[in-house]
Amino acid sequence: MAKPTSKVLVINDEPLILKDLLKGLNAAARSLDNPFGISFTGALTAKEGLALIESDGDIQVVIVDDKLYAVQDGPRRQQRNGKTPHGREPSRSLQVSALKLVQKITALRPELDLYILIEKEREDQVVDTLFAEAVDGYFYREERDYRGMYRILNAQIAERARTPFYDALRAYVQAAKDAWHTPGHSSGDSLRGSPWVNDFHEFMGEHAFDADLSVSAKALDSLMEPTGVIAEAQQMAAKAFGARKTFFATNGTSTSNKVILQTLIAPGEKLLLDRNCHKSVHHGVMLSGAQPVYMDSSVNRQYGVFGPVPRQTILRAISQHPDAQLLVLTSCTYDGLRYDLKPIIDAAHASGIRVLIDEAWYSHARFHPDLRPTALEAGADYVTQSAHKTLSAFSQAAMIHVNDPGFREHIFRENFNMHTSTSPMYSLIASLDVGRKQAVMEGYKLLERTLMLASELRQQINSTGVFRVLELEDLLPEEVRQDNIRLDPTKITVDISSCGMTVDELQQELFTRFNITVEKSTVNTLTLLLTIGTTRSKCSRLYDALMRIAREKRAPRRLYRMPDLPPFTELVCLPRDAYYSGGELVSLLDDNDQPNVDLVGRICADQIVPYPPGIPVLVPGQLITDNIVEFLIRYLRVQSKVELHGVVYQGYFPSIRVLTPQERARLTALNSAQPARIAA
């Protein structure tokens, strides 16, 4: 089993002092118990130290001298009295203050532990200044207690590497308690040795069942009201991701979004949201009884990619609806496009509007400077993350991060418990604990590799001469080109239009011939997701497959372009009111297989979501027009495998649920002077 490597960087501008420090500390590391593989290395300048921190992912701790000087005239060699061998008094100037260096280190790698070397007589001054920053402790420069320093640093790394919940779960399982409680498989005993289902037990493995325990195991805390190891694990996650509070969720970002909307929005209150947000946000609108104001996203029609909402659209929505309680945006998008969030969040806060950022696809960003700032760093009040998408957590494992100074935890907890199972799977919680540990201990190192592989893979794909990686300028819709949008390089979108196959044919070829599956597709693109688990060998296999297909030189084919999503029409009543109406089913087609004119002017009672792209064409309470009916029919006729969520089949006739005339007359109409849509 691989053993960890942990480096401690000491930044001190005195060569002899630095040499003594490193010698003494490394000797202590060799003579004492060293489970984390701690060793000490040095840098004489702030610049050199920052370069090492950037280049070496094994650095876990930095010790900074509180004053770093630079000699301006000649060699660095000095006597103890401060004079050079020739008797000249050297000119010294401060390289950088410890405060500024700490800020630079934190900006580069906020997960690192930081300690300061200080003089005893300056203790109060230095401590008061630096402990406002992310400093973990300090040592006296005059005291050379190397073994004591080592023990403190070893304990600090051990604290950061701790996994409170996973450790407790593992200890409980290893204690092999007799279970007289749920679940019914009783640590796998119901399956073990069965002639019918033992194969499932063997496939899943012993511990999958041993660790599937009841909430009766009090030592493992309660996700619904944590006070023990789950609470501790959540506190450590909050520190790691830069939040005031963090909550673990075992049913994904989908439920996390609903919890936040129900917490922040009362029935009839207003929220601003991008129309292309995840369907869970739209579900949250229905559950909370909110009055939504939809903002049209930008669209790259050439590639079928939905981009961010233009900044001016968002600012206009904030200006027109200062009474909104919440702004909801998705950053980054499925395709890796991310907002310049700070000016948007600042504008929302200036109007007293809280901000929720769906960061489902961006949970890794905190741990590499090329991917930051994160939404929390940009000032978001609430952030939801699917830790399973880009970190090492199990599917459905998610986190809710809170930085809202007015956070009402009791209300949040009531809504959280409304959606959370009273029998959560402990393996999911443990994976969040372990995923956080990996992110803080080696996330930077792994992401360095991932970003390098992403750069190499881009070049390899382009070298095929048939497949082409779309860069930011290719993906950006025209209306957001001035919005400082950035691209997450771990998402690679490939133009496949020259390969001579449809996207479905290409995906099938990759799957059956090369054993490769990809994240998503449009009519002429494939999207590849690189994570901290991506390896060079996987990249090589993908490149080999694409190169082989390219060499077959199929003639390019005309690809059918999906119909454009029609613009939002009008919200006639609250989505919740429409959704909870009984309604009636009306067919999209009439008896002559033509668009059913009886649907035009009716009010939709369900959410109708074409997938891909997964953006609602209709939401409950929305007015149906003739172009929407035509769009849905065209979409259904494009291909046999199309998904159109919310459409109900009556025999062979696709139908949608709409309000009856009586229900429409009974429901309160929204104020038409308050637009439900902000156009791009």
Image: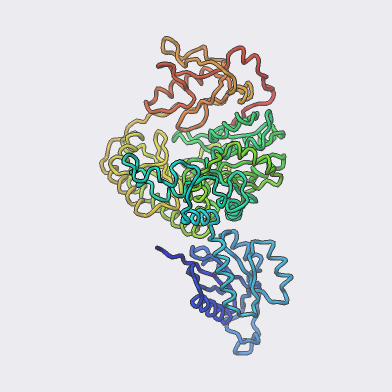
Q: Residue 5: where, in percent of width, then height?
A: 47, 66
On the picture, is 533 further left or further right than 151?
A: left
Q: Residue 96: where, in percent of width, then height?
A: 64, 69
Colour basis = rainbow
Q: Residue 378: where, in percent of width, then height?
A: 62, 49
On the picture, is 400 further left or further right than 425?
A: right
The N terminus is located in which quarter? bottom left
In front of the other: 142 or 559: 142
In front of the other: 178 or 437: 178
User: Is residue 120 depicted above or below 262 in this figure?
Assistant: below
Name the residue furthest left: 552
In front of the other: 220 or 442: 220
In front of the other: 328 or 466: 328
Name the residue furthest top: 591
For residue 215, say whether it is visible.
yes
In percent of the image, x 27 and y 37: which residue is there?
A: 554
For residue 241, say whether it is visible.
no
User: Is residue 163 depicted above or below 484 in this figure?
Assistant: below
In percent of the image, x 53 and y 57: which residue is there?
A: 163
On the picture, is 119 further left or further right than 617?
A: right
Q: Residue 463: where, in percent of width, then height?
A: 34, 49
How many discs appear? 0
Q: Quadrant of residue 680?
A: top right
Name the residue furthest bottom: 86
